[in-house]
Image: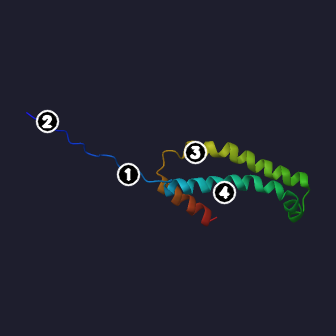
Amino acid sequence: METSTINKDTTVAKKKGLPAALWALTISAFAIGTTEFVIVGLLSTVANDLGTSLTSAGLLVSLYAIGVAIGAPILTALTGKIPRKQLLMGDYGVIYNW
């Protein structure tokens, strides 16, 4: 009795590169990080435009950063169970009706 084996190639071709959603997340994170640091180079211009001292403008930037550092984890915890689409539409409603 002869036995023969048949090898089936069951490998699946993998896509190369990152998915579009991951690229969007990467670009968004870069943009948010950039906005946090670009203000330092523009601080004297912002102070002149607002008619305040450089110290006051620096304090304004620091207060914004503290608000983001404290508010982001709290908002994440509070909105974690809300479906993303509803949360996004609610955010759009708040921003564009302000």
Q: Are marks 1 and 3 in contact (CB under 8 Å)?
A: no
Question: Between 2 and 66, which is closer to the camera in this rendering?
Answer: 2
Q: Nearer the viewer, mark 1 or mark 2?
A: 2
- Residue visible at 48% across and 45% down? 81
Give the SS element for disc 1: loop
Amino acid type of the residue that numbered disc 4 sits on in the rendered structure: Ala
**Which of the marked residues, 1 or 2, is nearer the chain's N terminus?**
2
Question: Between 11 and 51, which is closer to the camera in this rendering?
Answer: 11
Task: Tell me how far mark 3 sits from mark 4, CA to CA.
Answer: 19 Å
In the figure, residue 42 lies in which quadrant?
Answer: bottom right
**Which of the marked residues, 2 or 4, is nearer the chain's N terminus?**
2
Instruction: Classify mark 2: residues with Cα within 10 Å, few (<14), some (14-19) or many (20+).
Output: few
Residue 48, label in figure:
none
Give the residue pinned by disc 3. 76
Q: Nearer the viewer, mark 4 or mark 1?
A: 1
- Residue visible at 33% across and 46% down? 11
Give the residue pinned by disc 2. 3
**Which of the marked residues, 4 or 1, is nearer the chain's N terminus?**
1
With 29 as the anchor, is 37 left or right in this view? right
Task: Tell me how far mark 3 sits from mark 2, CA to CA.
Answer: 62 Å
Give the residue pinned by disc 4. 31
Give the SS element for disc 4: helix
Amino acid type of the residue that numbered disc 3 sits on in the rendered structure: Thr
Give the residue pinned by disc 1. 13
Amino acid type of the residue that numbered disc 2 sits on in the rendered structure: Thr
Above or below, 11 relative to 39: above
Above or below, 5 relative to 37: above
